[in-house]
Image: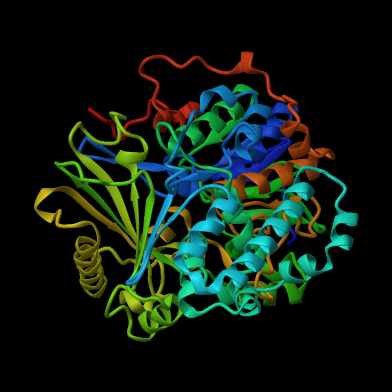
Amino acid sequence: MATDVTSDQTTRSDRYDAIIVGSGIGGLVCGGYLAADGRRVLVLEQHDVAGGNAHVFRRRRQYEFDVGTHYLGDCGTDGIIPAILSGLGVGDRVRFRPMDNERGFDRVITPTTTLDVPSGWDNYRDRLKRALPGEAVGIDTFIDLSKSTTALSRASLLGEPVIDLYHANPEVTRWSRRSLGKVFGHCGFSPKARTLLAAQFANYGALPDDIGFAVHANLMDHYMRGAYYPEGGGQVLVATLVEALEGHGGELRTRTAVARILIENDTAVGVELTDGERVMAPLVISNADYRRTILDLCGGEAAFPAHLVRQTREATMRCPLTAVYVALDMELPDTPNANVWWHDSDDLERAHARMIEEQMREVPQLVFSFASVKDAGAPHVCPPGHSNFQIMTLCPPGYEFWGVEKGPADGGRYRRNAAYVARKKQVTEKMLATAEQVIGPFRDHITHLETATPLTNERYILASGGTPYGLADWGGVGKRPDVRTGVEGLYVVGQSTRYGSGVGGAATGGMVCASHVLGRRLLPEVHRGAVLGDPSLLPDRGPDWDPLRVSRGRARQQAKGLARIG
């Protein structure tokens, strides 16, 4: 893409060393470490607040709903996420509340079984054997493969020499490159066993045949090391990363959308904003949706080889999600400090296929996340005696199901579309009716009800397909791009990279990207205790400290329109 960057009077140059497009967890982690190294970093976010899927929203001055941070794993003393925060000098600014890791941080319910999933692979193995007494051999094979695969993955991330380990474990290496479904077949599992083991597939938005075994195993290992919830919700984590970025001289500009990434002579040179302003830097990191980065922001074939553009254009996305946010004027009785994963069948794969085929005539699975239990007593979550929770389900892909032809990222209007409104109402009603079958009646106590569809998700984070999970098939099951793009000075981070789903995966990808830029293995360093950030540069937190306000960026903290609690 040839761009004349010298004659435009709106061009800013020689001001930034790096520009980050999008402010999800991956972009903020990467930006924070570059800023801590002394780089001049600019983060650009089109939404009102930073965070991507980790942001929160507030309603009725009483309730705060977490969009995507439902639980985190590996937040103990040896954890990856605490190490990343500590390396920025902000480790003491986020506290993690443990869920019920002994009794079970996830409760899986099928028509014939209730399985409480505890931390620890061997504890999990014992629970599975009690639930599936005839499949003990397959369970041993599966757990042993999972433990070996995740041990190698973690060793590699933490900088240990693993080549000899891989050579010594050829079977593990072979199976780690196959789909979860193939490993299930190798273990000889029944549909019921496959259902119990893949019950939390909404954590990554893909069925067993469509997800790599290593992806599933590493995500489960994340939680096997203990499941937690950040005290104060996901926005506290986001605001803490913003404080690290700005404290070290970086800049966050919200309400600032990028129209193009500027590339000259196969080298990234800056960005052009939607208002025509150009901001120049020798390094651009896109935390935007991967397909939109390659095909739209960078101009496709103008910047990349034809085969990569074709591969990206033909890529499929993981499943979209619908979420219903519920507030009640009562507490839910006997609610565990766990997520609840309900399935209407002992064959989740068949049930999911039926849901797609029948266009969601019935709801085959629901996920419940109880924020008012995980962050009990937090005044921003809900008033005393009230409840705050989410009900989620995967839904059919594509715009047609929602009665529209194109999405909001491409200018499609949908919120007042009659077909969309009718479908949204229908899906919400089905989810509520099914939820009451699972946790008991609650609709007479609803004080706030709101539904977010895949189009809602696309509107706020411009995600292809409206999915929060990123790419599904990018030239092969489980295949995903690395953080390097082949264009000099251009990197990508976020949910579609090879480093995994969720907050932990996005944060790891951000660390890997910063490592490539800085030429050092950051994750092993900070896991061993290195601190690159300077805590003395961080702002004080007064009694009125508000993570949502901080997440707007220093320049817009006092701007109008910020929702409050109380």
Q: Quadrant of the C terminus?
A: top left
Residue 266 is at least partly visible in this image? yes
Residue 276 is at least partly visible in this image? no
**Left or right, residue 417 beside residue 128:** left
Q: Nearer the viewer, residue 202 or 498?
A: 202
Q: Nearer the viewer, residue 464 or 155?
A: 155
Residue 314 location, quadrant: bottom right
Q: Nearer the viewer, residue 397 or 459?
A: 397
Spot the residue most to the bottom.
357
Q: Percent position (x, y) of residue 552?
A: 45, 34
Q: Tell me: residue 116, above or below residue 480.
A: above
Q: Tell me: residue 94, above or below residue 54.
A: above
Q: Percent position (x, y) of residue 477?
A: 65, 74
Which residue is rendered at x = 60% and y = 65% of the image? 291
**Left or right, residue 72 beside residue 415:** right
Which residue is rendered at x = 69% and y = 53% of the image? 262
Which residue is rendered at x = 22% and y = 68% of the image? 421
Q: Percent position (x, y) of residue 436?
A: 19, 61
Q: Nearer the viewer, residue 232 or 164?
A: 164
Which residue is rendered at x = 45% and y = 65% of the image? 131
Q: Tell me: residue 439, above or below residue 421.
A: above
